[in-house]
Image (tube, helix red, strand yellow):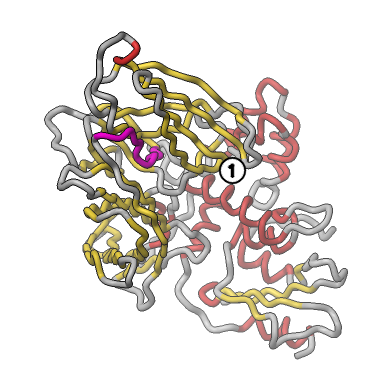
Amino acid sequence: MPRQAFLNHVRYLPGFLLPTLLLLTVVLARPACIVAQEVVAPSIAGPDFHASVITFQSDQGVGKTQVEVYVSIAYDQLYFVRAEGTFRAEYDLNLVLLGPRGDMVFDETTRSRTTTPILEETLSDEIVRMQRFTFIVEPGRYDLKVSLIDQQMDDPRELGFTIDVPGYSESRLGISDILLADFLGESDLSLPAGAVVDYAGSQLFVRQGHAYIPNTRGMYANFAPSVLAYYEIYGFNPVRRTEQDKLYRVEFYVQNDTGETAVYYMRRHEKPGSSAFNSVEMNIQDLTPGKYSLRIDITDMGSGMTVSNEREFTVLESYLTLAFQDFEKAVNQLRFIASERELRLLRSAPEERRLNFFKQFWASRDPTPGTKRNEVMLEYYRRVAQANEMFDIPQLDGWATDRGMVYLTLGLPDYVDRSEFSSGSNPAQIWVYNSMRLHLLFEDDSGFGDFRLINRDDYRERVQQQIPPER
């Protein structure tokens, strides 16, 4: 198909329902203009369906281990239907555990329903529903599969793991898995172990006098104050002849992906009995973005025995951190959604007021200003990070490319046609947004992966945003 024929063809596609991604574009560009829909489909961009597996000592028999699986599902992964003035999603979660010989050990399905009267919340990857599965097994290697089955969709989404379940003993020093949390505190004494309560729109889980919201992604922003973790210790030496016998030492290490220790500190505690149930808060404000592990070493001061465990986590770059460290770059990243007036105000802001101006820019686009989370801002910077991974080319960050521009404002296309269209000898891609009645043609005339948007007028017409001039 010649290029001009393609450009003529894409202007006259049949109409469909407006998808979630275009709703987000409307919020980014014009925060006051939100149109209610009968159906809000899940985002194709967000992999926000996670599971975290934690093992503890079981009190239901010698040689048994308690396994807890926390599953989190962001709202943008669910299919919401409007009914009776609100938006409703219904889904099943199925967890299957297979033993070392492929035998079925555990199979449980739960059905859940969640509702929200706010359209913008159905687009959020920060509003999350959680489910905890608990089962008791013998130590060994198992295969675990978690399936999300949306009542409005045909194809389930699945997560798969191979897990090594350890054994714990009352007579041998041991440490449980480390549970990362977004919230962690003491529980109300009236709440029974295993209780689940709603807290600020999230599920709060209770265990051994602690209440927590698990962080199943293992991700923290470096502008956040700390990483929160819960862990248990078993099998303290019962001998208490000396003062030393009564104590145990805990050492905390945060190490980067090369094994260097970035944070360290130590505590000594008196043994409360044969077991202890502890939490820790590790300051990460000075950590650069990247992959880390939290290692906890436990030493029984009486026996001298030491055990350790560790948990990996990722520190993400916060938008405020970027604004503080490289304000020019932070402002440039807004050029696809900011007006010329807003860009002038940000670039001319006095140094002492820059951060406030930056916060005000995003506050004006917050679809839920009464809440702590700005879903539009969080989604935008998630897309910036994803664009850098997918579209990075020599000497240009992925977000700054034409494909990055389209992804930041429209999200991923329904599909990409790389084979049926060719423009001369140049590699080409067609991004298809069915529900937006939009096909976008990209060509790589450099041969280095720098795909330029050809039909910019069609993009401009759909997004209704000012587009920077071609480079």
Residue drawn at x 71%, y 28% is: 349
- Hey, which residue is sitting farthest bottom in the picture? 1
Residue drawn at x 69%, y 46% is: 333
Q: In the image, is residue 179 part of the stretch drawn in magenta? A: yes
As drawn, is 438 to the left or to the right of 49?
Answer: right
Q: In the image, is residue 403 part of the stretch drawn in magenta? A: no
Residue 105, percent across and down?
24, 65
* In the rendered image, the vertical position of residue 234 relative to residue 430, given as above or below: above
> Residue 288 falls in which quadrant of the image?
top right
> Residue 156 falls in which quadrant of the image?
bottom left
Identify residue for label 1. Answer: 291
Q: Quadrant of the N terminus?
A: bottom right
Residue drawn at x 55%, y 58% is: 25
| Number of marks | 1
Q: Nearer the viewer, residue 3 or 132?
A: 132
> Residue 229 falls in which quadrant of the image?
top left
Looking at the rendered structure, the kind of residue marked 1 is Lys
Span of residues in magenta = 171-181
* In the rendered image, the vertical position of residue 63 relative to residue 105, given as above or below: above
Residue 246, percent across and down?
29, 15
Residue drawn at x 62%, y 83% is: 12
As drawn, is 49 to the left or to the right of 437?
Answer: left
Residue 76, percent across and down?
42, 58
